[in-house]
Every structure is written in structure tokens, then in C-alpha cells.
Image: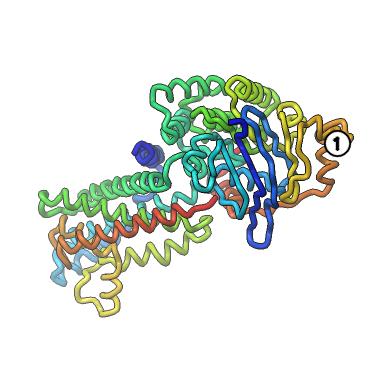
Amino acid sequence: MKAIYILCMRQLKRYGRSPARVVGSLGQPLLFLIALGFGFGRMFARAGGGSYMNFLAPGIISMAILFNAVFSGIEIIWDRQFGFLKETLVAPVSRLDIVLGRTLGGAIVALAQGFIVFVICLVFGFRFGNSLLLPMAIVFMFLIALLFTSIGTAIGSILQDMQGFPLIMNFLVMPLFFFSGALFPVRDLPGPLQIALRLNPLTYGVDGLRGALSNQFAFSMATDFIVLSILTAILLAIGSYFFSRIQL
Amino acid sequence: MSEMIVVQDLVKNYGDFCAVNHIWFTVAGGKIFGFLGPNGAGKTTTIKMLTTMLEPTSGTLRVNGHDPTHEQRQVRRSFGIVFQDPSLDDELTAYENMDLHGVLYGVPSAERAKRIDMLLEFVGLSDRRKDFVKFYSGGMKRRLEVARALLHKPRILFMDEPTLGLDPQTRNHIWSYIQRLSKEENVTVFFTTHYMEEADRVADDVAVIDHGKIVAQGSPAELKEKTQRATLEDAFIALTGHTIREEEATATDRMRMMGRVWRGQRGRR
């Protein structure tokens, strides 16, 4: 337990000490929020969709969490490179404790970034519906963070160096974001796209968060929560498995 | 327990390449053992197998009476290690690096704080304890790594080229402390080095490995006598020849290179 705690704290300390990273990773969500939020806002309202900002904000919060979570997980590659990974791997603690500590820390960091973006959304005119559902929104944000940190952990355990990073960004993280319903409604999409969205774990995260914050569900809170929880557990197990197989 | 490290018929193959080829040796408790060999001879591979980082292809290993493959936890508790490459978290302070190590090794908190203070004092980093490691010089990082390896009072200390890049003052300071540890607290020391005069001075026993095979072992005096050379360096050359070895850059080395370009030179040794 102590090992999990100290490794989790390490992630948080590193995050807190690098304001460049905190600010830097706000750029992208900010850009999407302003460009799309104001760019498409009128059109969306005219088409009868209501406030696009209220629709978009949960998607952008999810995006911030997604990117930070995957990146936190992939940090294993840097630790491998700068040697710190060895120090933890020869310590008399189980690999499971190490990977849980790291993943938990990474997820909390991603969650923190999500909160910052949440506040920014409020500044740009986002209004959430029911404050009683706010705890549920936090639950969804945390599940998204944990799920994608686990994916990052799995990837970081397999890759030897950063060469594959653009590949991951362009062929995994970007598609996960664009085909999640973060930017447009899931309903009334062409068949194949509909299927792609339903296979994407982020879709349930975005939907759950949007439901909790803006009371607009494509599925239902129960569906979103159950699907997301199960997927998170599975991916956490997969991430731990690949981490346990690292050889130095 | 007189034999702290036992290696019997140890083999490690990477595909067709045989990195360690049927080697045997033992290290008695409280001794300082120098493991010598040219680049790429199999030194680091052997250390990795002894320290549970790598599984042997075949052979028997005992570290403090335990098998590194199947009793990892017991083996890991027994040793401290100074790696060949840096292994500190640059974004943490010296104290935090030590503290994290202490927690991972289950050192109780009161004792942890006391030992960290004592060890940082010993390696001369007390007044820099709150500085981030990224602002440390190469030599300071090395000293911190030695201090960290000793924090949990290991029975065995592995050191892979520990004095690389250190000035003679620091080298002497560290070695005299380690010699004292081995005498007074019966700590067994297993180290590799390319500085033969260092091995000659501090090692009770040495083994010379080349192309994955042990070509000679005994005390430095015995090796000099056997090869009829005046210094251990000459004896080493006589045993391993004059050819300069090439090592392929690993993925990690290439990454380091890239990291250096990305982050600039600051904070790297």
C-alpha cells in the first residue's frame, strides 16, 4: 500500500512542479472550445440542438482528460530512458503495486487537468444543469482518466522509445477523440460510424459526463457507468499485465 | 552463510548470440569482488541476472541463499545496487529520491529519516538535499546513487562501474567507506570497473570475463603472478588481448540521445 501511495505521490509532485505542462496541455482544449464552440454555436442552435457550448463542454473536458491520461501512462517510456524505472523494478515490491501507483497517479493528474478545463468552460459560457449530479460527473471524469491512463501504461510498457509516439497520437488518440461523440451527437449517424462510436470506450465517458453535466444522454447513466467501469477494469488489467512483462 | 553469491554454469543467450557462456564463481560474505572485462564481455548481463532483472537461459544462481528467478522478493531485499546508467528521478529532490527508495524498501519512517541524513552527510550532499536532482553534476548524482543503494542496509552491494566520471577525491572517499562497511558490517561487494588500479587496490578477489567466458579468477596478486605482469592492467591486457571491442547502441542509448536533444544538455551528465 505504501509503495502505491509513494509512487502515486511522485506523479502528482512531478505534475505540480511543471507549470509548463499544466499550461501547455490547456492549449488544445482551449482551441477546440473557442474555434468550434463559437464557430458552430449558431448553426447548432439554428438546427434545433440548443446551446452548443453546453453540448461541447463535456466533450472538451473529456478530450483534456483523454490526452493527459494517455500521456501520463506513456511516461513510462521516459522513466525507462532516464533510468528511474530500473530503480522501482528491482525494489522488493510487486509489479502490481508499482503499476497501480503509477496509473492512479497518472489518472489523478489527468483528472486535475479535466477540472481546469471545466473551469475554463464555465468562463466561456458553459452552464451545467443539475448540481446534484456533479459528484456523478466527477466519477465519470475519473473513470475516463483511469481507463486511458491504463491504455497509456500498456503502450508505454510495450514501446521501447518515443519513435512510435506520432503513430499513437494520430492513429489511436485522435480517432478515439473524434469518434466519441465529443463534438457531435451520436444519434442519426451513418451506420458504420454509429458502430465505430459504440465500440469506442470514450463514447460512454463523454455521454455519461454530458448526461451528468448537461442532462443530454444518448444512452443512459446506468449504461454509461456500467460499460465504462467494466472497460476500465479490463484495461487496467491489460496495462498491469504488459507492465509486469517489462524486461530491462 | 559464507557464500553470499553462487554462480554455477550460468548461460544467457540472446537468439544466436551467447552473452554469458557457462560461467562459475562464488563470492564469500564480507568480501569485495571485482568483476572485470572489456566492453561487451557480459559483465552487465551477469549483474542483471543476479539482481532479478533478467532471467538466465540456464544455470544456477544464489544470492544470499535465494534464487533470483523464483525468490525475487527475498533476493531484492538483500541487495542494493548502483546501476551503470543513471537511475534517479531528475524532477525530485535528493531527499525525495532517498525517501522514495526507503519507502519502497520498507524502511520504517523514523529510521529512514535518520539514515537519509547520515548518508547524505557522508556523500557530502547534506546542504543540497532540497535541490532537484536535475541541477546536480554527474559526480553528485553518482554519490547520491551510492548513498541510496546503502539506505536499506543491504547485505550485498552491486555496483556497475560506480566510479565512472568521479574525481580521485570522491573515488577514494567512497571506496574507503565501502571497505569499512565490508569489514565492520560484513557487507559483500560486487563491482565492475575499467580502472584496473582501483580493482587492484580494493578487491579481495577478481574474475576476468571476456566473450562471455571467465578467463581468470583469483586475488589481484595471483593474477599478476600467473601472467608474470607487474600491474593488474598489464595482466588484464595479457588475458584479454589488445582488440578494441564494439558495443551496439541499444534502443535505450538512442532514446537518451534523443532526450538530450529534446531537453538540452542541462541536467544530464
Q: Nearer the viewer, residue B34 or A157?
A: B34
Q: Nearer the viewer, residue A33 or A212?
A: A212
Write down the chain letter for disc 1.
B
Q: Position of residue A69 (x, y in %)?
A: 35, 52
Q: Nearer the viewer, residue B180 or B92?
A: B180
The quarter of the displayed image where residue A206 is located: bottom left
Q: Say if residue A28 shows up in the picture.
A: no
Q: Residue at x 53, y 33 (%)?
A: B135
Which residue in the protein does label 1 denote?
A: B226
Q: Position of residue B36 (x, y in %)?
A: 73, 39
The quarter of the displayed image where residue A220 is located: bottom left
Q: Nearer the viewer, residue A59 or A193?
A: A193
In the image, is A115 to the left or to the right of B100? Answer: left
Q: Residue at x 67, y 44 (%)?
A: B43
Q: Residue lying furthest right in this view?
A: B228
In the image, is B172 to the left or to the right of B122? Answer: right
Q: Position of residue B207 (x, y in %)?
A: 73, 39
Q: Residue at x 50, y 58 (%)?
A: A159
In the image, is A205 to the left or to the right of B154? Answer: left
Q: Residue at x 15, y 53 (%)?
A: A127
The amino acid type of the residue labelled 1 equals Lys
Q: How many marks?
A: 1
Q: Could you classify mark 1 by the number of other residues whose Cα lies within 10 Å: few (under 14), some (14-19), or many (20 or more)?
A: few
Q: Quarter of the image for the N terminus of chain A: give it.
A: top left
SS of the residue under disc 1: helix
Q: Position of residue A134 (x, y in %)?
A: 15, 49
Q: Residue lying furthest front in this view?
A: B1
Q: Say if residue B17 shows up in the picture.
A: yes
Relative to B162, is B39 above or below? Answer: below
